Image (spheres, grey):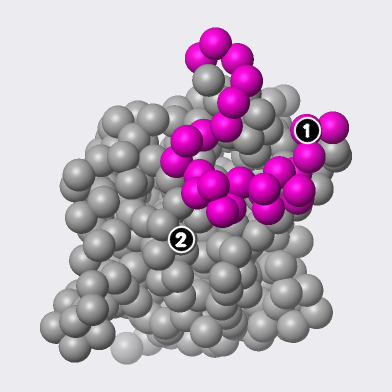
Amino acid sequence: MSPFVFLSLLFLFLIHGSKGQLQIGFYSITCPIAESIVRDVVREAALSDPTVPAGLLRLQFHDCFVEGCDGSILIDNVPEPEKGAFEHQGLRGFDVIEKAKAKLEESCPGVVSCADIIALAAREAIVMVNGPSFEVPTGRRDGFVSEKSLADDMPDVSDSIEQLKTKFMNKGLTDKDLVLLSAAHTIGTTACFFMTKRLYNFSTSGGGSDPAISPNFLPELQEKCPQTGHENDRLAMDITTETKFDKNILRNIREGFAVLESDARLNDDARTKAVIESYLGPFTPIFGPSFEYDFVQSIVKMGQIGVKTGSDGNIRQVCSKLH
């Protein structure tokens, strides 16, 4: 094969090869070191700042739930970017994605999408907190739209269980996916700002706390987030193992020790409650489902929401710049 023919075929592959479904090892020919570059960047960041893994995991969720998994959450050079929405406040990890992108552009210019970097970084984040490693289908392209108003339908901490189920269903996700992806709260923290209503103003008539909170847990939450305290103070979302990926968050939810209101709501519905119970039974380790395996299935499934492939997207040179 002549060099001209080879280069022509490679160009067609880069432009059109990702049209259709994602695939494992999408960059095995065009950028075989892509995944190792992302791994090294995430590992370095996580070792210097233990809060990085939770930030990267949350970043993928927020990217995928608005306009699909297309890297639109990273854009900041438009008038009202998606990342500026109220629903996205507190997101972090943007610098890690940009650093990985810069290194990838040095080695494989114009090949690896920002959307894929987010997905790969989330996988590495899970591994860094003793979670399962898994194959990430790649081949996403970056989206052309970033608009703050598009985040209005993001799941919210104060949503009812029916609202949560509907929002997940609208993305092609099941009740089981809702439970498993909520269990990502096994790592990371939340701000007291998101706790005020649940702790001090839960009743429709004003005042009171969420009755789903265990009486043995309420004083601890109120001590960490006093009514007159700083709303930016933070507390772990998993009170037992906040820096380790495990299923203890589900036990907390079942027993009234959920920190987030939306997590507690999973106990309000027979179907989501049954999913929680399926991972906590006395014989689960031997005969029951694997939490780690099922979580991987759900996050891979989430990573395919509304992906852009082929000519539906492009490859940004800088993740934060649309053009």
Viewed as shown, does residue 148 lie left or right of 143?
right
- In this view, which residue lies farthest toward the front? 215
The residue indicated by pointer 2 is 252
Q: Which of the pair 152/210 is nearer the observer?
A: 210
Which quadrant of the rendered structure holds the C terminus? top right
Residue bounds of the magenta highlight: 204-228
Q: Secondary structure at mark 1?
A: loop
| Pointer 2 local density, CA inside 10 Å: few below 14, some 14–19, many at least 20 | many
The numbered mark at residue 227 is 1
Q: Is residue 190 above or below residue 79?
A: below
Residue at 23% over, 58% down? 275
Residue at 75% over, 50% down? 224
The numbered mark at residue 247 is none
- In this view, which residue lies farthest toward the left? 287
Is residue 256 in sight in this rendering? yes
Q: Is residue 176 above or below residue 211?
A: below
